[in-house]
Image: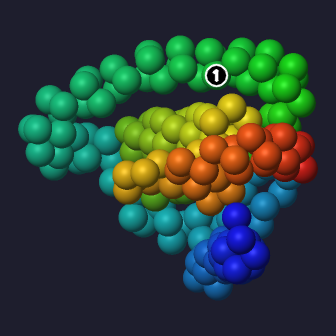
Amino acid sequence: MNDKIASILKKIDELEQKLKDELQYEDKPFIDFELIGKKICFNKDIIKEQQKELKNIWRYLKEAPLAFILTAPFIYMLIIPAIILDIFVAIYQTINFTIYKIPKVKRSNYIVFDRGYLAYLNTIEKINCLYCSYFNGLMAYVSEVAARTEQYWCPIKHAKKIAYRHSRYNHFLSYGDAKAFREELEKLREELQNLS
């Protein structure tokens, strides 16, 4: 990778971190809550305001389109392969990342369950949010495990345009550059050891 590209990538990483920081606090002025340990705490007035928007379960089900109710089992049946994937990726990472000295991906950074603290969600909505948080967080976690694995074994960009670039892709080597692959593979593996 040439110096100009490396410089641009460094700026992109810095801007992405800046954006993450800003997005994290974007809603804070509108909703007053505190993070105490792992628990999110709202003041009593906010909870009362949120509860005004709570739709009871019977009303929620009555107003739900029939298609929502009929398709729910097909959405939720993915929980079984998701849990199996979660277990196997944890085993995979524990064994392989330990052997290859790749820092493990912290699962809790990706799978976050915080929507249950919202007083305006009924039980069904909280279960839906729990499922979405788990499934989407799991996919992001698995993607990061796969990205680190790919950087270790095959850090080569694709010749064809791809729809999604994972977190490590920009560090990969140009497609078809055999010399760079042989000369820089170990350096890219060492780069992984600096991740947290």
In the image, residue 185 above or below residue 29: above
Question: Please, which colouring scheme is shown?
Answer: rainbow
Percent of width and height locating residue 153: 69, 32
Q: Mark 1 points at which residue?
A: 89
The extreme left residue here reads 66
In the image, residue 168 above or below residue 101: below
**Pointer 1: residues within 10 angstroms few (<14), some, or many (20+)?**
some
Which is nearer the eye, 41 or 146? 146
Split into 4 quadrants, where in the image is the N terminus? bottom right
The extreme front residue here reads 179
Q: Tell me which residue sits at (60%, 71%) in the image.
A: 46
Percent of width and height locating residue 176: 53, 48
Which is nearer the eye, 134 or 189? 189
Which is nearer the eye, 172 or 38? 172
In the image, residue 126 above or below residue 11: above
Percent of width and height locating residue 54: 40, 57
Q: Is 21 placed left or right of 147 in the picture?
A: right
Q: Tell me which residue sits at (71%, 50%) in the image.
A: 180
Q: Is 25 placed left or right of 66 in the picture?
A: right
| Location of residue 78 by image quarter | top left
SS under mark 1:
helix
Give the total number of marks visible in the rendering: 1
Q: Which amino acid does label 1 sit on?
A: Val
| Location of residue 161 by image quarter | bottom left
